[in-house]
Amino acid sequence: MNTQTLINTAKAMVADGKGLLAMDESTGTCNKRFANSGIPQTEEARRAYRELLVSTSGLNEHISGAILFDETMRQCTTDGTSFIKVLVDANIIPGIKVDFGTTGLPGCPGEKITEGLDGLGTRLQTYFGMGARFAKWRAVIAIGDGIPTRTCIEANAQMLARYAALCQEAGLVPIVEPEVLMDGKHTIVRCQEVTEEVLHQVFDQLYRQHVIFEGMILKPNMVLPGLACTTQETVEEVADATVHCMLRAVPAAVPGIAFLSGGQSSELASARLNAMHVRFNTLQTRLPWTLSFSFGRALQNEALQIWSGAEENRREAQAALLHRAHCNSAAALGEYNAMMDVT
Ligand code: 13P
């Protein structure tokens, strides 16, 4: 492992207002989204859609890296160029989702644990050889009656840290993603408490397992009220709750925090990220880490709807992806304005 290379990659992933395109939906998740849009759930349709994404001209002005799924890592454009080469040629760093998804956590009803540690070291070496320079592992924490339990938080934190240590050993920057879900009636205060507790546990485990904070990226949820909560805070209140939570729990040595979108609308995700910059990165103060994005749905939703599986919609879908990437990189610099989304 070359520590300086890891650090340089991690910094590049969040530099210059750029962020990450999460296009690493598993086959099951991708098929579900295709089914909702009436798109055939075939390998060729998934390939064509991912080709549309990676070959969007100008994407590299706003996107520093793209998170791929195993199937996509091995796919090519119609002219036979591997997606990895397309990305590298565009100066976009390829990354790979390496977890195998979640399963029920025994003894903890309603809670999940992420699988995929067995044989991970070998898989990481293979991905590095294929050109990946960072990886992603997602843990999910649900809020509800009596949950999350300490068992669930600790088990997931341990696995995230084991994964992160293995990544760094293999020369890959780990994206550490503990996602506190938006589903439920809980308040923003409850989300803040849970997110803070989860992050403390995650960083404790990362420290104990010798992960180099300078060579990783944190991918957390924003601090939000539950989707079914009767009080929905303003953009500014969400920005304040999120940044205060991060200030309490994320070491300053971490170069970047790249938020997931988690089911927020595209416009709200941009506005909330923007507000964090406007309110906290001023002439007088600067946050210790870069705040950026690693959005899946909040970058892709419009593009997928427009494409709908039809080749003739490709250009318009790419324009929609580019527009969202532009809005989010503006937000990552505190320069997003809702007028950018008025059509
Ligand atoms: P969303 O932005 O759609 O939540 O996806 C991000 C992601 O990579 C989830 O693991």
Image (tube, rainbow, N blue to C red):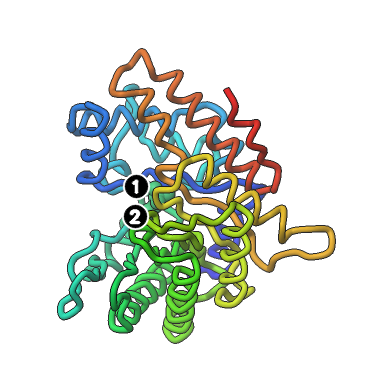
Residue, disc 1 = 24
Q: Between 248 and 50, which is closer to the camera in this rendering?
A: 248
In terms of image quadrants, where is residue 151?
bottom left
Query: On the image, which quarter does residue 180 sit in?
Result: bottom left
* Residue at the spot 57% in from the left edge and 70% down from the top edge: 246
x and y percentages locating residue 330 in the rendered image? 65, 41
Query: Looking at mark 1, is its residue's CB closer than 8 Å to ligand 1?
Result: yes
Q: Callout 1, which amino acid?
A: Asp
Q: Earlier in the sequence, mark 1 or mark 2?
A: 1
- Residue drawn at (45%, 68%) of the image: 191
Q: Are marks 1 and 2 in contact (CB under 8 Å)?
A: yes
Residue closest to the eye, 12 or 338: 338
Distance Cα–Cα, label 1 vs label 2: 6 Å
Dot 2 corresponds to which residue? 97
Few, some or many residues within 10 Å of mark 1 (<14, 14–19, 20+): many
> From where the camera sits, is residue 67 visible?
no
